[in-house]
Image (tube, rainbow, N blue to C red):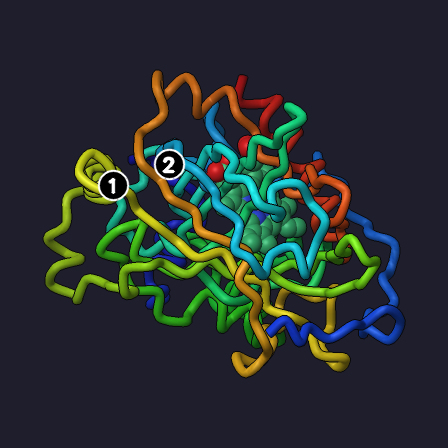
């Protein structure tokens, strides 16, 4: 595996119903400063941190699968979006490891959090995408802060004087420190992990009722992790091998939920998790049953856009638009 600037630095860190509230006005938003960072600069910085290559700037290693999404009876109470009504739709799902390192071993600390990207193929021929990860939070409240963290990482290679830029940054940014140091045990399977949408969306149902919420994706199988000895012994591609064998025998299933914001929950700060006690509404079941045909080429050809949304779902947290622009830049560089 290629060495890149911060890898050894970070490796030292143990990274390891229906009663939906109607919040039309008073949702908490923080006045957003004009962003200094552009999506292109962000992808440049990711390429500096992880090294140049022709794959995704982050979440570079993954596997593409196919399946079906079936809406739950409760879904239409949240949104008029076409895939949240009665009919099932086809989905494409990509599971991935965190780092922008195409050959990162699946048992490496920087392979977590894992990613899950879903494309819903809507009846009118358009798509709606969802891009989530296996950590309930994000290191930064906005794109500028995220770039500062990445720049600190890039400046903190093995030869950097102590305290490094990363040491200094984490000393004053406890949320970023928690994201990097929280235990993130390697999963038994990509299908045995809960995933979190982190950014909030605004949902509107056919009656005009508005709900602010964040996605949660919960495996039907109980969440299951490897212990330290199992992690050490795991093969570098064990997750891709596991899910390939798994779907050949039996579909891997998840429940898609929306966690509904209370009035005091911030809808534009993905770095702060909302309390687990918040009400959740079931949107449906994701059932994944095969590896995508011509997998490697299909994976390269697809770009998931978190702001590709049908009527009934809107971006609430502006990070989602920034992300989508950065994903387009990364997509351009990996062709
Ligand atoms: C400012 C914040 C963020 C930036 C700049 C950013 C940047 C990127 C970039 C450049 C890519 C590669 C896209 C491609 O080549 O197709 C990517 C992929 C990804 N990101 Fe983000 N990201 C951000 C926030 C997040 C958040 C909050 C999550 C999780 C909730 C997330 C999860 C993912 C996942 C799962 C992928 C892989 C998508 C796929 O499988 O194609 N990112 N991100």
Neighbor class of circle 1 (other Cα within 10 Å; few <14, some 14-19, many 20+) is: many
Q: CA distance from mark 1 to mark 2?
A: 11 Å
Q: Residue at the spot x=35%, y=50% of the render?
A: 253
**Image quadrant of ligand 1?**
top right
In the rendered image, residue 273, in percent from the top left (x then y), is placed at 58, 73
Residue that mark 1 sits on: 243
Instruction: Indicate if the residue with disc 2 has its beta carbon within 8 Å of ligand 1.
Output: yes
Element type where label 2 sits in the image: strand
Residue 120 placement (x, y as % from top left): 55, 36
Q: Quadrant of residue 267?
A: bottom right
Q: Position of residue 17 (x, y in %)?
A: 59, 74
Q: Which residue is mark 2?
A: 62
Q: Which numbered marker is on residue 94?
A: none
Whichever of callouts 1 and 2 sits on the residue coming sooner in the sequence is: 2
Q: Residue at x 46, y 27 (%)?
A: 55
The image quadrant that residue 324 belongs to is top right
Question: Front-most of 63 and 159?
Answer: 63
């Amino acid at each position: 595996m290629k060495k890149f600037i911060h890898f050894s630095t970070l490796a030292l860190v143990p990274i390891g119903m229906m009663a939906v509230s109607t919040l039309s006005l008073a949702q908490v938003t923080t006045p957003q400063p004009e962003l200094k960072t552009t999506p292109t600069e962000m992808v440049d910085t990711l390429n500096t941190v992880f090294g140049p290559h022709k794959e995704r700037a982050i979440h570079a290693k993954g596997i593409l699968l196919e399946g079906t999404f079936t809406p739950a009876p409760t879904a239409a109470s949240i949104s008029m979006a076409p895939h949240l009504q009665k009919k099932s739709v086809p989905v494409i799902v990509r599971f991935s490891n965190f780092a922008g390192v195409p050959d990162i071993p699946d048992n490496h600390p920087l392979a977590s959090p894992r990613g899950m990207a879903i494309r819903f193929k809507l009846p009118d021929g358009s798509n709606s995408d969802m891009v989530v990860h296996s950590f309930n939070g994000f290191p930064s409240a906005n794109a500028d802060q995220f770039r500062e963290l990445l720049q600190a990482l890039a400046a903190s290679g093995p030869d950097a004087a102590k305290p490094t830029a990363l040491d200094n940054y984490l000393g004053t940014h406890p949320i970023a420190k928690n994201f990097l140091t929280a235990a993130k045990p390697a999963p038994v399977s990509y299908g045995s992990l809960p995933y979190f949408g982190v950014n909030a969306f605004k949902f509107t149902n056919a009656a005009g009722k508005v709900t602010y919420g964040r996605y949660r994706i919960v495996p039907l199988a109980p969440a299951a992790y490897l212990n330290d000895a199992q992690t050490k012994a795991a093969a570098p591609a064990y997750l891709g091998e596991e899910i390939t064998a798994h779907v050949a025998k039996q579909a891997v299933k998840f429940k898609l939920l929306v966690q509904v914001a209370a009035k005091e929950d911030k809808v534009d700060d993905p770095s702060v998790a909302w309390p687990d006690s918040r009400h959740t509404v079931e949107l449906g079941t994701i059932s994944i049953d095969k590896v995508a045909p011509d997998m490697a080429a299909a994976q390269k050809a697809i770009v998931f856009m978190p702001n590709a949304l049908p009527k009934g779902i809107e971006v609430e947290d502006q990070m989602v638009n920034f992300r989508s622009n950065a994903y387009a830049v990364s997509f351009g560089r990996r062709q």
